[in-house]
């Protein structure tokens, strides 16, 4: 894999076309490239030096998928308006708020100016531009319809990011319940319960079973809190590493997620929407079916579906109809299979898949909104049971003494 060139910020001084002295800042890989860029802008460079990095300066912001989505739409708009590619990169790069994104855009621009195609320039940054993105750009360059495919890519990225946002929203609430409940319970057990325990000791007599249990649990937390939190942190770290490195672990987790009530249904619909949207975009770009399905499999976002789609690809390569292969997996609803079958018969696979994607994206939207409404009272109920249980356990001895008196 080629090493990615990094763009730095340079301070320059020069003479413009009117003979006036001017200065500014410009990003580039080398001083020579910055000087060449200035000359193209009609400026004669007199002094160019790398801008020193402040010791206390803010760190560059991370490039997010949303940044790539916005960049795709801006570039598509510029190209549609007839702006030359290199100039479009210049305008989009200079106007971006994220310095890291500016550097990325300028590096791609410099690579294109060096004689590479746009697809080759983007492929140098696989972390930000995946195989699907590069393949569609390459197809657009080959067919002479780059601006059209850039528009399709922008629409695709916007739709995919929207569905990802919905999934994150759906998964946030259950995670919030677990984390908040654990933190509040730990605080009560470590700091509050010991105060009651000292008071109970002065009472003498036997404590209720629930109170004894809570007191003993508090002692465990007081003595082993570091081990408990360490074990939880270690478990999270191990799971993250397994998620990154183990295909088998990914398959087990993804399969388990699909079986969860409500959440599993949302993930399933979102995965089908992404599958349909990706395949529709690649069909519309004229990509060969077998090649498109391999890219679609990698973009599905769920290992169970990735494995199934790769199996479908192998069957399609032997001449099997895609809707038949899809039905055999047992992972796609009958409506999706039937619509794809109609699309294959009428030669409108891309439009049918786009309709499927629109339908399931709306389904995910509605389900996430419904889940949010359902989880709000559930959060109150879970916290109420946990905290209320601890409070009752602490006051039971007092109630018992009151009854005796």
Image (cartoon, grey):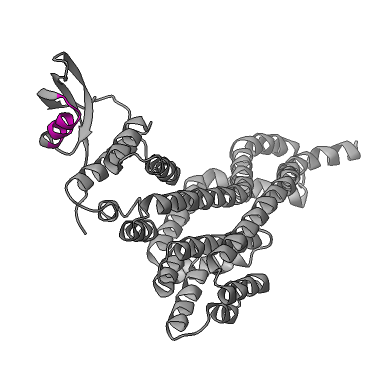
Q: Is residue 5 in sight in this rendering?
A: no
Residue at image coords 20%, 36%: 28
Majority secondary structure of the magenta segment?
helix
Residue 95 screen position, x and y as percent? 36, 30
Position of 164 compared to 298: left or right? right
Q: Is residue 199 magenta?
A: no
Residue 237 screen position, x and y as percent? 42, 54
Q: Is residue 91 above or below residue 229?
A: above
Residue in the foreground of this view, choosing between 178 and 309: 309
Q: Quadrant of the N terminus?
A: bottom left
Position of 400 compared to 296: left or right? right
> Please, which residue is most extreme toward the top here?
20
Q: Give the quarter of the image for residue 398.
A: top right
Position of 294 compared to 380: left or right? left
Q: Is residue 214 in sight in this rendering?
A: yes
Q: Quadrant of the C terminus?
A: top right
Residue at image coords 53%, 81%: 321
Residue at image coords 37%, 43%: 79
Q: Is residue 47 above or below residue 372?
A: above
Q: Is residue 40 magenta?
A: yes
Residue 363 screen position, x and y as percent? 67, 56
Q: How many marks?
A: 0
Residue in the foreground of this view, choosing between 15 and 241: 15
Residue 103 screen position, x and y as percent? 27, 38
- Range drawn in magenta: 33-43
């Amino acid at each position: 894999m080629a090493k990615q060139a990094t763009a730095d910020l340079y301070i320059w001084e020069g003479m413009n076309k009117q003979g006036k002295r001017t200065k500014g800042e410009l990003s580039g890989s080398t001083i020579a490239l910055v000087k060449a860029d200035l000359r193209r802008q009609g400026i004669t460079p007199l002094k160019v030096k790398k801008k020193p990095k402040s010791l206390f300066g803010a760190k560059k912001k991370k490039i997010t998928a949303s940044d790539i989505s916005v960049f795709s739409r801006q570039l598509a708009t510029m190209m549609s308006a007839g702006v030359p590619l290199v100039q479009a990169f210049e305008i989009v790069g200079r106007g971006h708020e994220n310095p890291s994104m500016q550097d990325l855009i300028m590096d791609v621009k410099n690579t294109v100016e060096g004689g590479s195609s746009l697809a080759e320039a983007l492929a140098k940054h696989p972390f930000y531009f995946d195989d699907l993105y590069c393949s569609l750009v390459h197809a657009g360059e080959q067919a002479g319809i780059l601006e059209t495919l850039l528009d399709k890519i922008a629409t695709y990225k916007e739709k995919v990011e929207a569905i990802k946002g919905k999934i994150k929203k759906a998964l946030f609430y259950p995670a919030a319940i677990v984390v908040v409940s654990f933190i509040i319970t730990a605080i009560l057990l470590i700091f509050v319960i010991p105060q009651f325990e000292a008071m109970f000791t002065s009472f003498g007599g036997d404590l209720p079973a629930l109170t004894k249990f809570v007191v003993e649990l508090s002692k465990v937390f007081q003595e082993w809190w570091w081990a408990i939190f360490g074990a939880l942190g270690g478990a999270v770290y191990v799971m993250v590493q397994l998620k990154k490195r183990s295909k088998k672990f990914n398959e087990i987790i993804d399969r388990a997620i699909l079986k969860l009530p409500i959440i599993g249904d949302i993930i399933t619909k979102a995965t089908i929407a992404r599958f349909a949207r990706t395949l529709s975009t690649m069909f519309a770009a004229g990509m060969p079916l077998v090649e498109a399905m391999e890219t679609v499999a990698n973009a599905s976002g769920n290992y169970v579906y990735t494995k199934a789609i790769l199996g479908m690809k192998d069957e399609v390569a032997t001449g099997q109809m895609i809707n038949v292969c899809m039905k055999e997996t047992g992972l796609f609803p009958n409506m999706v299979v039937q619509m794809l079958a109609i699309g294959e018969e009428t030669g409108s696979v891309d439009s049918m898949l786009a309709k499927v994607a629109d339908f399931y994206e709306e389904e995910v939207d509605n389900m996430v909104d419904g889940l949010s409404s359902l989880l709000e009272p559930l959060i109150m109920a879970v916290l109420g049971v946990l905290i209320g249980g601890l409070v009752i356990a602490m006051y039971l001895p007092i109630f018992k003494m009151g009854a005796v008196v």
